[in-house]
Amino acid sequence: LDEEIRRIPSADAVHLDVMDNHFVPNLTIGLPVVESIRANHPGTFLDAHLMITDADRHAPAYAEIGCESVTFHLEASAAPIRTARAIRALGAKASVGLRPQTPIEPLADIITEFDMVLIMTVDPGFGGQSFLTSMLPKIRRTRDIVQRSGADIWIQVDGGVSESTIDQCLDAGADVFVAGSAVFRGEDPDAVVRGLRDRPGTPCRH
Ligand code: ZN
């Protein structure tokens, strides 16, 4: 993992998919590995994406070990406001993730509790899946809700983001783009990162 991270110096952040084989049918890394990535990459913005059950219990620990942003899933949280506040109190950005079938509307009144909303554009659990264009209206509705709130809340898309899908996400109102397979399957991952970021007409919000 350290070597892979060193191959993408142009990336704005490193997105870490934590999976527990319960919330999703796959098992990846957990707290100790994220902690050692933190230690080995002190200047890197670490964006932890927790696809785990019982998020309220486990999410704050990722802020405590120094991740800059911690995303937990709404579907795995009984107390999303309390958990977001705990993450923020530890100095990290609090982010809420939504599976494709979870609507954004129930979050409208509490959207300012979060610094970022992660819209999954595939079913979470595995890399290499195709981008769901059916998520574009949800990204637009999320942008509307964020705009109405007046707060600076990032909208992240995760799943199937590539050179051929990123512009649609951007047009719909997303401003943080997670790319896995598109970046790492090629010979030069950093060139892909630069190509994804330097799109013609890309607004620079952050
Ligand atoms: Zn992710």
Image (cartoon, grey):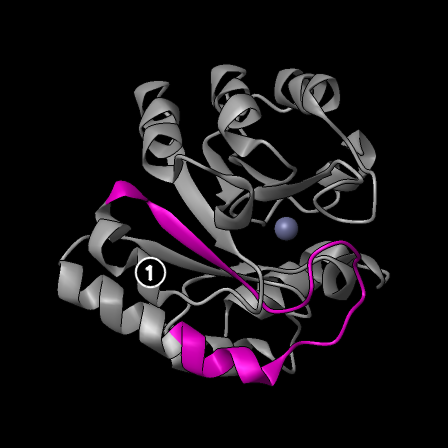
Compared across the picture, whether 92 is left or right of 72 comes to left
22, 1: nearer the viewer: 22
Q: Is residue 121 magenta?
A: yes
- Helix, strand or loop at mark 1: helix
Residue at horizontal 36 percent and vertical 78 percent from the top: 140
Residue 201 seen in the current view: no
Compared across the picture, whether 156 is left or right of 38 comes to left
Q: x, y (%) of residue 15?
A: 61, 44
52, 28: nearer the viewer: 52
Q: Residues within 10 Å of mark 1 (few under 14, many from 20)?
A: few
Residue at horizontal 61 percent and vertical 80 percent from the top: 165
Residue 188 seen in the current view: yes
Name above or below for residue 163 compared with residue 196: below
Name above or below for residue 95 compared with residue 148: above
Ligand 1 is within 8 Å of the C-beta of the residue at disc 1: no
Quadrant of res 104: bottom left
Residue at horizontal 59 percent and vertical 49 percent from the top: 10
Magenta span of residues: 113-139
Residue at horizontal 52 percent and vertical 28 percent from the top: 59
Compared across the picture, whether 162 is left or right of 7 comes to left
The residue furthest front is 78
Compared across the picture, whether 56 is left or right of 99 comes to left
User: Tag 1: residue type?
Assistant: Pro
Q: x, y (%) of residue 7?
A: 75, 44
Quadrant of res 202: bottom left
Q: x, y (%) of residue 99?
A: 57, 60
Q: Which residue is mark 1?
A: 106
Q: x, y (%) of residue 25?
A: 82, 49
